[in-house]
Amino acid sequence: MNLSSIKPAAGSVKQKTRKGRGTGSGKGGTSTRGHKGAQSRSGYSAKRGFEGGQMPLQRRVPKFGFKNFNRVEYKAINLDVLQDLLDKYTVEVIDADYLKQHGLISKNDLIKVLGRGELKSKVEIKANAFSSSAIEAVEKAGGKATVI
């Protein structure tokens, strides 16, 4: 076998249809564009969202509100969830890697610890944010709340 003998598989390569090459080709005359109208003319390009003159969807649907692009989205984790983890596994520090390892957060999530439930174990928690009740509960249990 050599490079000159390599061919594509039979039927895998189709010939391009040649439009506008006379009536005998079957694609002559109007060149498959139909008669008249914008789409038959050269230089035609449909505008994005154009629905043939019908009121387009983006104008039919009412608009309201806005999306704040400065919003910081946190993944909320409550103290009772952390206490369940501490009951199953003994650990001194809970951080993003530890929570990711146990399937509580995804790779790029920011963590906020909230104060639902109670914390009985002494543990250092490292997160992006804490609620005031969560900080209070962690320090009451003898632990430490560290903001990353």
Image (cartoon, helix red, strand yellow):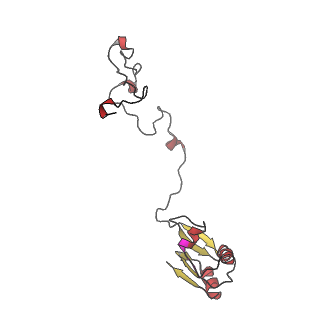
Residue drawn at x 61%, y 71% is 77
User: For residue 100, what is the image quadrant?
Assistant: bottom right
Q: Quadrant where the N terminus lies?
A: top left
Residue drawn at x 30%, y 31% is 4
Farthest front residue in view:
1
Residue 133 is one of the magenta-drawn residues: no
Residue drawn at x 40%, y 34% is 46
Which is more toward the observer, 118 or 11?
11
Farthest top residue in view:
24
Residue drawn at x 59%, y 82% is 92
Q: Where residue 15 sits in the image (x, y, percent)?
A: 37, 24
**28 left or right of 91?**
left
The answer to whether residue 37 shows anywhere in this view is yes
User: For residue 89, what is the image quadrant?
Assistant: bottom right
Farthest left residue in view:
4
Which is more toward the observer, 94 or 39?
94
Residue 94 is one of the magenta-drawn residues: yes
Point out the stretch of residues depicted in magenta: 90-97
The answer to whether residue 75 shows anywhere in this view is no
Q: Where residue 83 sits in the image (x, y, percent)?
A: 67, 77
Q: Where residue 57 sits in the image (x, y, percent)?
A: 52, 41
Q: Where residue 90 sits in the image (x, y, percent)?
A: 64, 79
Q: How many marks?
A: 0
Residue 106 lies, with reference to residue 50, above or below; the image says: below
